[in-house]
Image (cartoon, grey):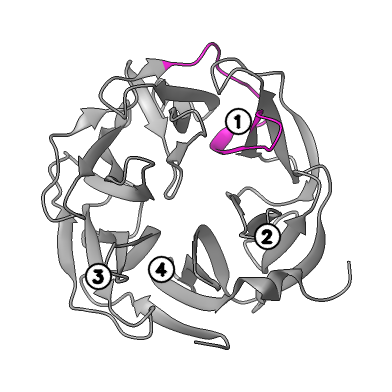
Amino acid sequence: MSGIFESIVCPAGEGNPRNSEASLLELKDGRLLLAYSRFYGGSEDAASGDISGRISEDGGRSWSAIFTLRKNDGLQNVMSASLLRLASGRAAFMYLRKNGDSDLHAFLRTSGDDCRIWSEEVCCTPGEGYFVVNNDRLVQLASGRLLVPASWTADTARDGHYRAVVFYSDDWGLTWHTGGQRLDIPGRGAMEPGVIELTDGRVWMFLRTQLGHVWQSFSEDGGISWEAPSQSPVIAPESPSQVKRMPSGRLLMIFNHHPLARTPLTAAVSADEGASWSRFKNIEDNPAHGYSYPSILFVGDRCLLTYYLDTGGWNLSLKFRSLPWRWFEEGAG
């Protein structure tokens, strides 16, 4: 399969104004499983919604009918899926259950039969409060440790200031523990963190901020303790970034390369573990649209992306794009 192809895999429509925050998993038989937030009670974050899914048997060119992966058993919704193939071979499925302004938690289920039967859920974010965990954020380190990065506030309606905290599990997600400290940044705080393991064994955290850049922190003990956050060289608005390691070993970042707007949606490559970035390429650049909450999955020689498309009026459709991962490394820079 060559070239680049894309589709509006989950278009917004009447009674379903928002499809967003997705994750992808390659099943053992080569099919793709897509999990995403499907809102049917409005477009706002507190509207009613569930985690829905679709299956592709041809690398994302066509998709099955929509089905429910996790029904809405929250007082508001369930949303923000993460799918991950664990080192054990089991599939992991993480999602948020939102009950109110002071009750948002992440939960994990695993499957040993490739997503047909799931284990009982386990809460990944012990403690009280409102824990924001983005889509496609569950990470397993080389040691086997699982990490869930979250941004916390006691009550999002009363206090819109967030602090980043990382939860970890050393028993394949059966029990979860809280990292050593909560990280803070000026403005609305340290928002929507993501983490990735670096080649020297450190864990790098990248953060959404209101300060015109991605901010960052590093851990030398597998995500338990963290250094004080600092500004990275990456210009970005108040929107989340996503980083994954390419088959070449370089890091790929998908983000909004603009200090204020969620357009364009840009890719950049780092050959020095995030210290610097080059080969900036726009994936989407319509100034009238918004693009955000990306997910990344590498399958063979392909890079598979999802992200929401906002054409105005807060009607969000989910977009899928497949392209050769080497495309990101081509060109000068």
Screen quadrant of the C terminus: bottom right
260 over 311 or under it: above or below: above
Residue 119 has which mark? Answer: none
Query: Visible in this render: residue 258?
Result: no
Q: Residue at x 69, y 38 (%)?
A: 199
Q: Considering only order in the chain, which callout, 3 or 4, is on the residue closer to the N terminus?
A: 3
Mark 2, residue position: 248
Q: Considering only order in the chain, which callout, 1 or 4, is on the residue closer to the N terminus?
A: 1
Is 186 one of the magenta-colored residues? Answer: yes
User: Where's residue 114, x and y in %?
Assistant: 21, 55
Query: Visible in this render: residue 244?
Result: yes
Mark 4, residue position: 316
**Residue found at the far top of this picture:** 180
Per the rendered image, the range of residues in magenta is 178-203
The local crowd at label 1, few if under 14, some if 14 to 19, many if 20 or more residues have their Cα within 10 Å, is many
Mark 1 and mark 3: span between their CA atoms?
A: 33 Å
